[in-house]
Image (spheres, rainbow, N blue to C red):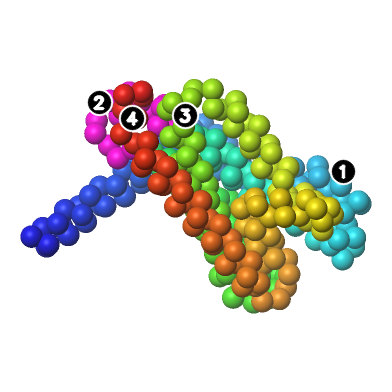
């Protein structure tokens, strides 16, 4: 009996993985159909914004980066890459259930696969576009392959965090169709409360505890520490980022499962 249950579970997991794989391929194909640069458009936005922020804020913040404009550019780029991944992946995961409502009403598919497929598609383009560049910068600054390997930890944390948020917003959108408008405001607040283009040191001491409540802050700080520090990675920052991503993912999954029985009635 136990063996039959194990085989059934393996079959279900394989089917789930195959569905997610199909959704990832479909999402990428639809998004970049007829595109000249294709998947590399996801890298172009952070690069352009890095140039803009460097031109506007570089001179003001350069003293926090050893008076190196290059270090400021790299710091801004790492922050922009992470926040761009968060905003684009979660905003598209938000509508993933409702936009596939007609399909879900015809074929019985695991509902959780749709936000997972959307986040995974963005992670694929992140790994092809931004991640190799971050790896290269890490190897140049640290000259230590350990740092390059350690970079995967906060990147995985970022994916877990976005998936947790994706679960929550995709579930809420089934019930509240005005959510995309509110989520634009929430995304902006997340962006401005995260040290993306500014150093965290300039934030007033009274505001620092509030800033640390933003899980993205610890993830971005961990990525930035590994890419730019040149020394061995800060284990505390890495653990903090993993913990933040894991907690948000767990909360998001539980929230998604809690509302799951009501989805099909409203989709």
Q: Between residues 149 and 180, which one lies in front from this camera angle?
A: 180
Which is nearer the N-term, disc 1 or disc 2? 1
Disc sitting over residue 173 in the figure: 3
Task: Say which of marks 4 and 3 sits in front.
Answer: 4
The percent position of residue 156, horizontal first and vertical second, equals 52, 58
Q: Secondary structure at mark 4?
A: helix
Task: Say which of marks 3 and 1 sits in front.
Answer: 3
Which is nearer the N-term, disc 3 or disc 1? 1
Q: Between residues 43 and 182, which one lies in front from this camera angle?
A: 182
Rendered view: 57 above or below 72: above
Crowd tier of the residue under label 2, counting other residues whose Cα lies within 10 Å: few below 14, some 14–19, many 20 or above: few
Residue 242 among magenta residues: no
The percent position of residue 103, horizontal first and vertical second, equals 31, 27
Q: Secondary structure at mark 1?
A: helix
Disc sitting over residue 223 in the figure: none
> In the rendered image, which quarter is residue 241 located in?
bottom right
The percent position of residue 34, horizontal first and vertical second, equals 51, 31
Q: Which residue is mark 1?
A: 56
Q: Which residue is mark 2?
A: 106
At 54% from the left edge and 27% from the top edge, which residue is drawn? Answer: 179
At 36% from the left edge and 23% from the top edge, which residue is drawn? Answer: 266
Residue 101 among magenta residues: yes
Crowd tier of the residue under label 1, counting other residues whose Cα lies within 10 Å: few below 14, some 14–19, many 20 or above: few
Which is nearer the N-term, disc 4 or disc 3? 3
Q: Secondary structure at mark 3?
A: helix
Task: Quote the CA–CA distance across marks 1 and 2.
Answer: 52 Å
Task: Quote the CA–CA distance across marks 3 and 1.
Answer: 37 Å
**33 sits left or right of 50 in the view:** left
Disc sitting over residue 262 in the figure: 4
Task: Quote the CA–CA distance across marks 4 and 2.
Answer: 17 Å
**262 sits left or right of 68 in the view:** left
């Amino acid at each position: 009996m136990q063996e039959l249950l194990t085989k059934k579970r393996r079959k279900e997991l394989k089917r789930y993985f195959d569905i997610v794989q199909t959704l990832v391929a479909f999402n990428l194909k639809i998004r970049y159909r007829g595109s000249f640069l294709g998947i590399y458009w996801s890298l172009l936005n952070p690069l352009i914004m890095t140039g803009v922020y460097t031109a506007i804020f570089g001179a003001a913040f350069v003293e926090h980066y050893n008076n190196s404009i290059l270090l400021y550019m790299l710091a801004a780029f790492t922050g922009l890459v992470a926040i761009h991944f968060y905003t684009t992946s979660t905003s598209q995961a938000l509508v993933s259930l409702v936009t596939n409502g007609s399909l879900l009403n015809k074929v019985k598919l695991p509902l959780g696969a749709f936000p997972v497929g959307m986040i995974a598609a963005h992670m694929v383009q992140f790994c092809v576009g931004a991640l190799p560049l971050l790896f290269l910068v890490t190897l140049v600054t640290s000259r230590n392959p350990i740092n390059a390997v350690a970079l995967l930890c906060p990147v995985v944390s970022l994916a877990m965090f976005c998936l947790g948020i994706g679960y929550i917003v995709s579930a809420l959108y089934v019930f509240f169709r005005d959510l995309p408008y509110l989520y634009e405001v929430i995304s902006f607040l997340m962006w401005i409360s995260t040290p993306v283009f500014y150093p965290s040191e300039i934030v007033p001491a009274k505001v620092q505890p509030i800033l640390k409540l933003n899980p993205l802050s610890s993830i971005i700080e961990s990525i930035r520490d590994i890419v730019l520090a040149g020394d061995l990675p800060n284990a505390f920052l890495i653990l903090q980022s993993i913990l933040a991503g894991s907690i948000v993912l767990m909360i998001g999954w539980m929230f998604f499962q809690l509302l799951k029985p009501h989805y099909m009635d409203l989709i």
